[in-house]
């Protein structure tokens, strides 16, 4: 969109690096001051703050739900009046910590062979996933204020808008404090040493230690088209050309490439009043050019030819934009997409670049490397809050929303007592969680016959038995779970008319302090049993008989308890209750039965 390449320059102007020629690796990190609450000063009077937001199920939902999420995202973009960037970080996963949290620990109880089988299955699925990569999403907001206190107040008021916008999307937004923001930078610069990060603000102030020493690597070289540190190679790319229409899965395709990448979308909103006034000036200028062109042709006695194609196209484009701004509540944004890829070798780096370029070509996008701007592009892509490259172009709200940062929600809650639930068919990551930590831990298994419902249930039973101390109770009318009970040393109780095992529904619990409540509960239970047995609702006479039986039984037990107060008498009370069923009691008292 070249209509505005001579306007709005102030909104797309890139920031200057703190050091044009850095003399150390520390000077390559674009940070001036940091605060424990996560507010960083990245340039003179420019402050930034980062938030971690969760993914939502976008690509796996129905079309109607996708439209709802898309409209909510457009609403959120229109509400933003400050510069911000959305970062998708495919960071290195600590596989050692993952295995410690997910794999079963041996207990030397005779079932370690089964634990090894389960661990082998999970180990295989872990390796089939993103090869040690986990994905995080950040929102980084940048504002200009006179001092830290004003910036802090501005972020506090802005967070209400952010929380509301992401809440409507179904995503959660978590503020990153200073240590967590430094950890993100540390994990990129020192990839593979994630567990070594440790930073304490009070200690750093006490000993006057530079915080950049804790996050930067030992060496960093910049070449015209790539970067290199002591262990890795990296390259900064950007989207140079966009098509007239783009799929909402394009960003997901880039982000799901199994490589260590950072995809950053820098957004600079243009105020609506500035947009409207500039559009009107542009339109009036085009109209003047058309009138001037027609006068020249009329002067040359050329009355039949139409206006030139270029002017006709410009007029049509600006009319469409004006209609969108006025009627469809659209806004204009300057947008730049920067991609950082990192690999162990230069060959692997070029292979990943070729994959990303191929995805871009498939979606009619041209992806190229930043030439002689690798350091500036790196600082732009990282969730610091600076933008030092001018590769921006104008997009309307709906066009920007097509760069959808959401894919599919992950179920990954590792910890003691967790259960392996299989593999996410979209992201290929393992599903692991603990239902006991949820507000409602109930679960259901649905599926057509033969889809593996029983197998799934047995797998979860094995997970629970081998990884927790919980009890497993199975009601098995089809005799499907006898083998697994036998394998794990379970107890099988057969209840039928052909065995001597039965359940006494009138059994008294251990605590008999509330006799009246227990008897009332048993009476209601027997009313329901009788109604189910008869297949119809009980009439008033039948209900009155049961009610009278229960009250007489309660009175007899109450008198027995009052006559005998001790422990021995309490046992007699339990025995009295167990020996008398409602059927026998009604038959004895009234000579009737149902």
Image (tube, rainbow, N blue to C red):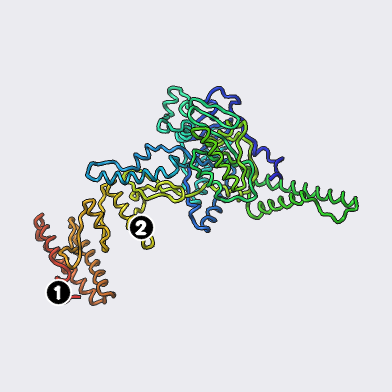
Residue ID at (45%, 27%): 214
Instruction: State how far apart marks 2 and 1 are (Cα).
Output: 49 Å
SS class of the residue under badge 1? helix
Residue 23: x %, y % from top left: 56, 22
Q: Residue furthest front?
A: 347
User: Height in image: 300 above or below 19?
Assistant: below
Residue labelled with disc 2: 452
Residue 256: x %, y % from top left: 50, 45
Instruction: For the N terminus, give its image quadrant.
Output: top right
Going 51% across and 28% down the picture, which residue do you hit? 229
**Which circle's residue, 2 or 1, is located before the other in the chain?**
2
- 558 vs 402: above or below: below
Q: Is residue 210 above or below residue 311?
A: above
Say which element carries label 2: loop
List the residue tagged with mark 1.
587
Residue depicted at 23% across the width and 76% down the height: 542
Does the rendering let one see residue 552? yes
């Amino acid at each position: 969109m070249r209509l505005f390449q001579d306007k709005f320059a102030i909104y797309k102007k890139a920031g200057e690096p703190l050091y044009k020629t850095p003399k150390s690796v520390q000077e390559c990190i674009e940070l001036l001051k940091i605060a424990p609450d996560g507010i960083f000063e990245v340039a003179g009077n420019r402050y930034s703050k980062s938030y971690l937001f969760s993914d939502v199920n976008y690509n796996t939902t129905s079309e109607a739900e996708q439209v709802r999420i898309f409209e909510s995202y457009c609403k959120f973009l229109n509400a933003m009046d400050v510069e911000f960037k959305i970062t998708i970080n495919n960071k290195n996963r600590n596989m050692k910590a993952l295995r410690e949290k997910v794999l079963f620990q041996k207990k030397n109880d005779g079932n370690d062979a089964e634990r090894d089988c389960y661990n082998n299955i999970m180990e295989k699925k872990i390796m089939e996933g993103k090869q040690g990569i986990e994905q995080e999403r950040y929102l980084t907001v940048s504002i200009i204020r006179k001092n830290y206190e004003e910036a802090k107040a501005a972020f506090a008021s802005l967070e209400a808008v952010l929380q509301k916008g992401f809440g409507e999307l179904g995503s959660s937004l978590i503020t990153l404090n200073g240590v967590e923001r430094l950890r993100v930078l540390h994990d990129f610069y020192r990839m593979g040493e994630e567990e070594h990060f440790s930073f304490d603000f009070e200690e750093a102030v006490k000993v006057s230690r530079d915080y950049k020493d804790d996050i930067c690597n030992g060496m960093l070289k910049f070449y015209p088209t790539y970067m290199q540190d002591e262990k890795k190679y990296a390259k900064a790319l950007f989207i140079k050309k966009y098509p007239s229409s783009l799929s909402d899965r394009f960003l997901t395709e880039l982000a799901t490439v199994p490589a260590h990448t950072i995809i950053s979308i820098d957004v600079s909103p243009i105020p609506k009043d500035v947009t409207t006034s500039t559009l009107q000036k542009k339109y009036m200028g085009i109209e003047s050019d058309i009138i001037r062109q027609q006068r020249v042709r009329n002067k040359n006695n050329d009355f039949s030819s139409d206006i030139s194609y270029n002017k006709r196209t410009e007029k049509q484009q600006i009319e469409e934009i004006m209609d969108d701004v006025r009627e469809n509540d659209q806004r204009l944004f300057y947008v730049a997409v920067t991609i950082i890829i990192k690999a162990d070798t230069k060959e692997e780096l070029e292979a990943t670049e070729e994959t990303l370029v191929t995805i871009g070509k498939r979606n009619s996008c041209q992806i190229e490397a930043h030439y002689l701007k690798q350091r500036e592009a790196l600082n732009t892509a990282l969730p610091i809050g600076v933008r030092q490259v001018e590769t921006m172009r104008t997009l309307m709200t709906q066009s920007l929303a097509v760069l959808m940062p959401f894919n599919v929600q992950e179920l990954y809650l590792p910890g003691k007592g967790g259960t392996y639930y299989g593999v996410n068919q979209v992201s290929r990551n393992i599903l692991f969680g603990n239902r006991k930590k949820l507000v409602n831990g109930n679960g259901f298994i649905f599926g057509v016959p033969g889809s593996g419902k029983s197998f799934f249930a047995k797998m979860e039973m094995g997970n629970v038995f081998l990884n927790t101390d919980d009890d497993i109770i199975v009601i098995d009318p089809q005799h499907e779970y006898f083998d697994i009970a036998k394998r794990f040393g379970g107890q099988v109780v057969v209840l039928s008319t052909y065995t001597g095992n039965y359940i006494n529904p009138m059994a008294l619990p251990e605590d008999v302090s509330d006799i009246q409540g227990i008897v009332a509960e048993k009476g209601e239970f027997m009313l329901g049993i009788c109604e189910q047995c008869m297949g119809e609702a009980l009439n008033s006479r039948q209900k009155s008989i049961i009610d009278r039986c229960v009250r007489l039984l309660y009175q007899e037990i109450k008198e027995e308890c009052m006559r005998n107060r001790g422990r021995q008498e309490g046992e007699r009370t339990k025995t009295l209750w167990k020996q008398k069923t409602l059927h026998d009691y009604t038959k004895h008292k009234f000579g009737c039965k149902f």
